[in-house]
Amino acid sequence: MTSIETFLNQPSTKKALNVPSEVTWGTCNDIVGRKWSSADREASFAPVVSQLLNAGIHVLIYSGDLDYICNYMGNRAVAEKLTWEYSDEFRSAKDHEWNNGGGLAKSSNGLAFLQVYNAGHMVPQDQPKQALAMITQFLNAEKF
């Protein structure tokens, strides 16, 4: 059991989150996974992201560079192909090192793409300090 599973299955955590005591949390659940339809898995969320950006809502797309499930190359391609008011500016923005070697970032006009170094599918588990910096920076609307 991972430390996340241990924490989330503690009676005190369940109580604080109003989770029934008989529920057991796990990192992956095939029963839940099978409930998703193929349409859910194949649907693109890109139009909604474009709407958010056009409404002035900041968006962060991130991936660990060791994640082969949701790899950074595919996520970057999605970010590059978004259609919104500042698409051209984002596409022409330069990559730059982020957080003293913690990753590679690209950002413009409310859209940030971040490739987190030495992290897999669970960036907060693999690189907790970088994940905290990333979330803090995003929530404080700081430039990437």
Image (cartoon, helix red, strand yellow):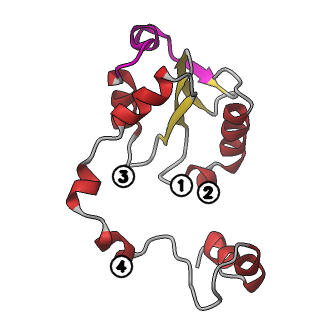
Q: Is residue 109 above or below residue 59?
A: above
Which marked residue is nearer to the observer: mark 3 or mark 4? 4
Q: Nearer the viewer, residue 8 or 21?
A: 21
* 6 horizontally vs 59: left or right: right
Q: What's the residue type where badge 1 is placed?
A: Met
Give the CA separation, mark 2 to mark 4: 24 Å
Residue carrying label 4: 31
For residue 140, above or below residue 45: above
SS for dot 2: helix
Q: Which residue is mark 1?
A: 122
Residue that badge 3 annotates:
69
Q: Which mark is residue 125?
A: 2
Asked which quadrant contains residue 38, the reply is bottom left
Residue 24, how many percent across, how many down? 56, 84
Give percent across and percent down for residue 74: 33, 36
Q: How many marks?
A: 4
Q: Amino acid at mark 2?
A: Gln
Query: The N terminus appears in which quarter of the rendering?
Result: bottom right
> In the rendering, at what x and y percent does residue 9 appear?
65, 81
Does residue 90 show up magenta in the picture?
A: yes
Residue 44 lies in quadrant:
top left
Quarter of the figure that contains the C terminus: top right
